[in-house]
Image (spheres, grey):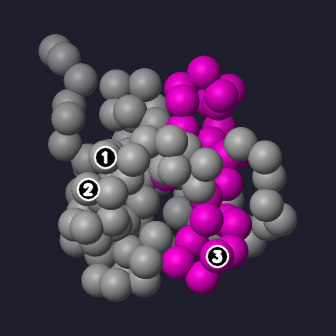
């Protein structure tokens, strides 16, 4: 049996709650769930998924260098099983996401 490509319902719900239904990047209504590490490499962990609006999701995928600098794309070789790479939110704050659905605000870290 192969890997599922669908985000489990409970993870989808937890990400939407954690991100308060807003795009993590711009603050508008979040409509799409984005995998920071490719799905096949990072799976459906809560720390790997962020809520984005359609425009930000398109921008992240079309501009991977900027997305890497702001933590929206994370190369799989950076992580050691826990997603410790911060991302910059819509208010310019750097946050760490955990696999329980939590958010910790942190200082900017060189990616």
Between residue 6 and residue 109, name the one nearer to us: 109
Q: Which residue occupies the foreground of this view, 9 or 74? A: 74
Query: Label 3, label 2: how many angstroms apart (C-alpha)?
Result: 20 Å
Q: Is residue 78 above or below residue 98?
A: above
Whichever of callouts 1 and 3 sits on the residue coming sooner in the sequence is 1
Task: Indicate the secondary structure of the residue bearing disc 2.
Answer: helix
How packed is label 1: few (under 14 Cα within 10 Å), some, or many (20 or more)? few
How far separated are the C-alphas under marks 1 and 3?
Answer: 21 Å
Q: In what quadrant of the picture does the C terminus appear?
A: top right
Give the secondary structure at mark 1: helix
Q: Label 1 belongs to which residue?
A: 62
Are the residues flagged by discs 3 and 2 in contact, CB closer than 8 Å?
no
Residue 43, image x, y percentages: 40, 34
Secondary structure mostly taken by the magenta-highlighted segment of the chain? loop
Position of residue 109 in the picture relative to residue 80 (left or right): right
User: Within 10 angstroms of label 2, few (less than 14), some, or many (20 or more) residues?
Assistant: few
Q: Which mark is residue 92?
A: 3
- Label 1 with label 2: CB-CB less than 8 Å: yes
Residue 10 seen by the camera: no
Say which mark, if any, is on residue 58. 2
Q: Residue at x 49, y 50 (%)?
A: 67
- Relative to 106, 31 lies left or right: left
For the N terminus, the quadrant is top left
Please, which residue is most extreme toward the top here? Answer: 1
Count of numbered tags = 3
Instruction: Estimate the x, y position of residue 86 in percent, counting from the top left.
Output: 67, 54
**Residue at the (26%, 56%) spot, across then down:** 58
Q: Which residues are magenta?
A: 72-95
Where residue 37 appears, x then y in whole percent? 46, 36
Q: Position of 83 compared to 19: left or right? A: right
């Amino acid at each position: 049996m192969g890997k599922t490509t669908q985000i489990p319902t409970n993870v989808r719900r937890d990400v939407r709650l954690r991100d308060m239904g807003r795009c993590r990047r711009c603050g508008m209504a979040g409509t799409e769930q984005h995998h920071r590490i490719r799905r096949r490499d990072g799976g459906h962990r809560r720390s790997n998924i962020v809520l984005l609006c359609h425009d930000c999701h398109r921008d992240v995928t079309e501009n991977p260098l900027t997305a890497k600098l702001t933590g929206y794309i994370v190369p799989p070789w950076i992580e050691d099983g826990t997603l410790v790479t911060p991302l910059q939110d819509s208010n310019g704050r750097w946050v760490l996401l955990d696999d329980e659905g939590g958010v910790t605000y942190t200082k900017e870290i060189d990616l």
